[in-house]
Amino acid sequence: MYLDYVELENYRPYYGKQRINFGFDDNKNLTVILAENGSGKSTFVNGITWCLFGDEKHDDREKTEPLYNKIMAEELESEDFTSLNVNITIRFFDIINNEKKYFTVFRNEEYNNWGNSWEKSTQHLTIETFDGSVYKDDMAQYKIIGTIPEDMFQYFFFNGASLNNYFNENSKLNLKESIYNISQLDIISNVQKHIKGCLDKYNADYKKLSNNHEKNYNGLINKLNKQKSAKENEQKDNYKKIDEAINNIKMCDLELDNVDISEVDTLTSDRESIQKELKKSQNDYNEIYEKYEKKIIQLYPLVVLFDELSKAYEITHNAKKKKTAPPKVEIELLRDILSDGICICGTDINEHDECIKILTDRLNNTSNVTKDDFYEYYYLFQEKLKELYSIHDIDDMKNSLNSLKESISLKKDQLNDISQKLSNMNEAKIKRLENERVKNINIRDRLRKDNERLSKDIEKLDSDIDDLKDEREKQTVTNSKARSLNKKIFFTEDALEKTKSLSSDVEMFIRNKVNENTKQQFTKINWKNDKYTDVILNEDYSINIAKYDEYVTPNDLSDGEVNLLALSFMMALHSLIGFEIPIFIDAPFENLDTNKRLDFVQGLHAFTSNKQIVFLLTDSQYTSDVKSAMKPNVFNEYQLIPLEKNKTVIKNE
């Protein structure tokens, strides 16, 4: 949606009807409004916000002057008129189905003179939409806000002098808040809050249905979800710190790479190769050590019990060889003989005490092992003894581990030597960078290990939560109300997880997109000696800029450079907006010297050719060289001319 014209009538210093026509095509997307300070530039923009929203949002300082034009009021009063109208009309256009359509907004505020003063009487708002429908007052305001969100106005009306607020974390226009607002990530956040509220309600209703003796599944699930959320947040914080450490490593590498010392280049190259070899050796060591531990655990009991196992195997082997009667059969036979008192040979053993004693001792010393048990143990002893054949593998693995350990130790010594050599050079900068690099590598590696542990914890919690949900599902089979609530709980739990994931993915995508576009705009400015080559928007929304051979922050830039970075960021933000309205920039070249103004203007059109932009400039900013550079892309140029106090007219240049 593009501006067609703005007409102000009796609004503050604008006397009578004053109109600015805007335009837009592929080549000309700029409108220039020239005025000295105090001539009504900011008031003009305030008039637009007043017409759209009934409020002067661009400059919200308290004003003592009335909304109506005082000179017009005096003239009307002198002619005995009792009515004065303040009118602003804004007409937008868009191309719909290859046809130019209009969207018109008209706000009127009427004042009546009741003797000594002009008093506000009525205010009316009327709009005519693209399809020709007409709406008035409240319905009209609703339609406007639906088309141009009121809380987005600050991203279409800028003051060049305050652009550096993007880099002030205490400002409402800071990087993070700006990205969140303009991409409307708060919508996802509000959805999450709503789903969480529904889930809490369903859980409370479910608890009322449950018997006191029943297991509180929802309470347990919520407890585990809180633990999971805490670990996920810890993991997310770690990822941010890892990214920060990686960026710090990259910054150190960038500076080291640009140090003009051949030995440094050789050493840093050797270090990269050794680090790759070290990583492979450490992975091999861990893999073999894991197998080594398993083999030790497997064979240790067999080695300790080797004599007993050998003896047991010998006994069972000899018994098998002699084909001895199964012990179970022998026990039953001895019991029968002792019970009947008659031997299988027919002898009455009651007459022979020594026979009874021999038979009784034999019975007591005979095992209860069955025939099946006997052969099972026999083959088990045989199998376990065979496992000992692989005991030599332990020696092989031990030798491999020792060899790898020596290799790892050697590589670490080599890396320490390289770091020591770099540190011992007469370059204090290199020493600082090396120490900083090692420090950040340690931070990165430690946090990666922490995140691996957290991932396992989260995976275990997910499994426990799923088990509890399965149990809860079984519990509700016979209760239709509980079953219905359970389905809602399942749905909201799943929806909550998905919105969390969506929020994270969208935030990352948008941040990366803004980073890419900011970098594209800022680095293509004709910086002397390629002064700035990269822009990094970190996960914590801090920003770093590659300046020659190091990364700096916006605080390290000049005022003019900060403004250029802010303008680049602003244009990147607008690449995300799902609707089109013009961008108004008051004093866009504030704090920029002439060369930087030209650099920015010359690169502006390629980056903003699809945006309608209105520049409000002073003569001191709109110099002849800037004007010449902008001319091919300027559709219209106007000047605000103060004829006298409280009387400004608009002249088309």
Image (cartoon, rainbow, N blue to C red):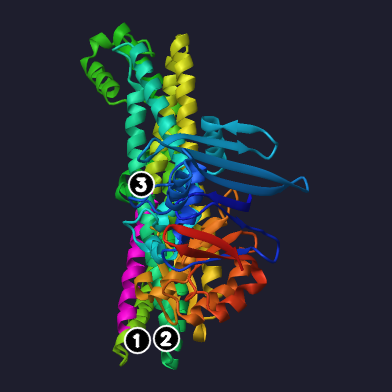
C-alpha span from label 3 to label 1: 38 Å
Q: Which residue is mark 3?
A: 233
* Mark 2 Cα-neighbour bin, 10 Å: few <14, some 14–19, many ≥20: some
- The x and y percentages for residue 77 are 44, 44
Residue type at tag 1 = Leu
Q: Residues within 10 Å of mark 1 (few under 14, many from 20)?
A: many
Q: Position of residue 445 (x, y in %)?
A: 37, 63
**SS for dot 3:** helix
Quick one: label 3 or label 1, which is nearer the N terminus? 3
Residue 393 visible? The answer is no
Q: Where does residue 142 sit, x and y in percent of width and height?
A: 53, 34
Snapshot quadrant of residue 598: bottom right
According to the picture, the residue beneath numbered tag 2 turns out to be 267
Residues marked 1 and 2 touching at CB (< 8 Å) = yes
Q: Earlier in the sequence, mark 2 or mark 3?
A: 3
- Which amino acid does the dot numbered 2 rest on? Leu
